[in-house]
Amino acid sequence: MTERNYEGQEYTAGVSKPLGPVVVSDADDATTVEGVLDLVRKQGGRVTSSRRLLLRALFDSKGHHTAEGLAAEVQKQAPDIHLSTIYRNLDELERLGVIVHAHLGHGPATYHLAAAAHGHFVCEECGQMIEAPDTLFKGLAQAAKAQFGFTIDPHHFAMLGRCANCA
Amino acid sequence: MTERNYEGQEYTAGVSKPLGPVVVSDADDATTVEGVLDLVRKQGGRVTSSRRLLLRALFDSKGHHTAEGLAAEVQKQAPDIHLSTIYRNLDELERLGVIVHAHLGHGPATYHLAAAAHGHFVCEECGQMIEAPDTLFKGLAQAAKAQFGFTIDPHHFAMLGRCANCA
DNA sequence: AGACAGATACGAGTGGTTTGCAATAAGGAA
DNA sequence: TTCCTTATTGCAAACCACTCGTATCTGTCT
């Protein structure tokens, strides 16, 4: 079946975790802001306020965020944080496997937590986006594997088409 | 970002069409350069040399072409033809349904004859591109339709993943 | 041949992202 | 605590893939 091809570790799906007071978590627990920051530190990275604020924004609203949107969110707390810093941190978090980005159309990329990875159907007419469970791609995954030895990653680019209303 | 080679991929699947000598075709026959030019004229457009050269480039090598690649090809014959003219003509030809464009990765879009439309699998590692017959997407199409009423168009964005070698 | 609209070359602008660099600051050592 | 190293930041500029405004040119119709 289709799996993440991003170089991250495994994530248990659907875990929800109280944030609570800032307590240093014990392990490689990438399901909280502080857990990820531990991971960052462990990889030789440094815990900075832009990093923490960015993670906060990502964890607070687990939807699809553009870099610009995240910057705006972060800048509510710290207006000096530059868009290029956001991009660099997003790259870093993606490298660590904490987040992934997807392209839903011709606009900017969108970022979300890797744990919430899924496919996307986007209507070419009205732009409506549907989050598609991986099970839908099972047949395609098998066919691609059988015919070409190709392992699909259905998360990265949206599948375009027409939604029920527009078709 | 890894370098990708969209250009020069061979056209393997689907319709293959003899070009034959340049003979003005009789009807809406979009399978030859002159046939398309007839269509252009019929739509109120004008037959210009950049249009003809661009079509020649598209018909001569039926692979995936970037705008830049096509410009280079056209400019071999007529160096003054500007990239913006290529873009405007590609738009026009797409509007007429003669060509389509696809996004195979993070680089520029690629254009090819609409008659040869197909899905694409692109390896995230090595960039290899596989042309996927539409039949492969049948299961996904049915599932998307059944679950969301969504009609997929599997041609526009590539399906990323890992090829047999890189997996 | 003349008129008119569509097409062109050129250059400048745009959106989204990346990069070079000097200044700053995190985190370990002393 | 202070020092040191080097990761990170802010800023400006560059970058890529287009897109657009405009004056000029050229098919096409008459």
Image: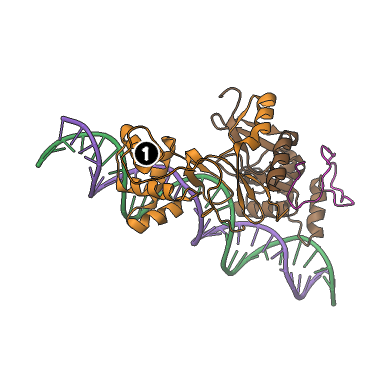
Chain colours: A brown, B orange, C green, D purple
Q: Residue furthest right?
A: A26
Q: Is residue A14 above or below residue B145?
A: below
Q: Work out whether A139 lies above or below B52.
A: above
Residue that protrudes farthest toward the top in the picture: A165
**Would residue A112 be seen by someone viewing this image from the given angle?**
no
Estimate the x, y position of residue A112 in percent, counting from the top left.
70, 42
The mark tally for this picture is: 1
In magenta stretch: residue A64: no
Tell me the quarter of the picture where residue A139 sits: top right
Query: Nearest the camera: A127 or D28?
Result: D28
- SS for callout 1: helix
Answer left or right for B27 relative to A78: left
Residue B55, given in percent of the width and then of the height, sits at: 39, 46
Range of magenta residues: A1-29
What residue is at 73 percent from the left and 49 percent from the top? Answer: A5
Q: Main secondary structure of the magenta part?
A: loop
Whether residue A162 appears in this view of the structure is: yes
- Residue receiving disc 1: B36
| Amino acid at pointer 1 | Val
* Percent coordinates x, y for residue B123 in the rendering: 65, 51
Q: Is residue B100 left or right of residue A59?
A: left
Q: Mark 1 packing: few (<14 Cα in 10 Å), some, or many (20+)?
A: many
Check if residue A16 falls in the magenta segment: yes
